Image (cartoon, rainbow, N blue to C red):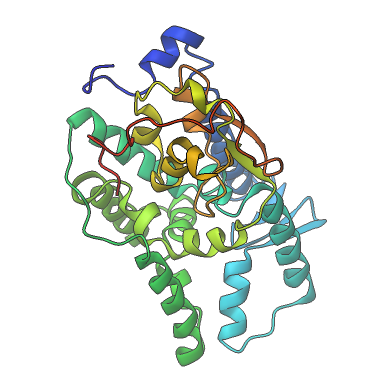
Amino acid sequence: MSPNAHPGQEAIIANGWFQANRWLISRRLSQITILVLFLLGPWFGWWLVKGNLSSSLTLGILPLTDPFVLLQSLASGHWPETASIIGALIVISFYLIVGGRAYCAWVCPVNLVTDAAFWLRERLGLGGASSLSRKTRYWLLGATLIMPVVSGQIIWELVNPVSMLHRGLIFGIGFAWVILLAVFIFDLFVTRRGWCSHLCPMGAFYSLLGTHNLVRVRADNRAACNDCLDCYRVCPEQQVIRTVLKDAEKGIGPVIDAPNCTNCGRCIDVCAPNVFHMGLRFNNKVSVETSHLDRPNHSSGVEVL
């Protein structure tokens, strides 16, 4: 494959356009549908869902609460209502199954902004390694939980791009769009996947919920890997792929069990030999076909940030 070719071209030729984009299409439908459900009330008066991603009530029955917001509320010294606690438990239970960072890929509307920046960055051929550690987001997560203790207020929600995007869509252009534009420019010109993969404290929090989730991307067919590097080029968390593809001889199983995997499915889309598929975390043993693999490391020639 040519290093200048867009990732997924081989998959399109081998499997067809839809098959090579089915997980991306599903994610976009999920993100847009969730966003539209929240906007139907303010825009058209159809209140199927009241609230926002921080706290909502669906059909007047189902409460859903962002557990990260609930944790900040507790840190600020404010005890939430019973409905908020129930809503947070429902959300936590869901992400313990599908993976915490599935929120980032399938729900978070800011992902539309950062993916757009990544798409444009790829087309413009912008490179350059990041000096930011991926652990920075965990330091910021700690800061967002310390600030409520000190101030008695949920400070992070005042500048949270997710909350600000909702406010911007409902109340019109304002400071919210400045924040979103800053995120877009940062991801476009400063560093690849800078916000979601290096800074966002929400992503850091949800990764902690995805430590032992059941639904996982698997590379059971890794013996068929042709080293095209497309999976690395599209993955927002490139570091989660290398081990399962290259360390079978070390006894590493085919399950991508890193908590920062977003279960976005793009590696499944762009892989022409169909190395990856969505499955469960069970049966994570090295198969006979892959136990003897000794191919060169994928990281050569690839910017892994």
The relative height of residue 58 versus residue 245 in the rendered view (above or below) is: below
Residue 266: % across, % down: 48, 32
Q: Is residue 52 visible?
A: no
Which image quarter: residue 72?
bottom right
Which image quarter: residue 70?
bottom right
Residue at x 43% of width, y 59% of height: 164
Q: Nearer the viewer, residue 267 or 25?
A: 267
Q: Is residue 6 left or right of residue 249?
A: left
The relative height of residue 16 versus residue 275 in the rendered view (above or below) is: above
Q: Is residue 40 visible?
A: yes
Residue 209: % across, % down: 61, 61
Residue 271: % across, % down: 46, 22
Which quadrant is the N terminus positioned in?
top left
Residue 120: % across, % down: 26, 33
Residue at x 24% of width, y 52% of height: 186
Q: Count how many numbered circles sit on residues in the image.
A: 0
Residue at x 46% of width, y 17% of height: 272
Q: Nearer the viewer, residue 89 or 138?
A: 138
Q: Is residue 140 left or right of residue 265?
A: left
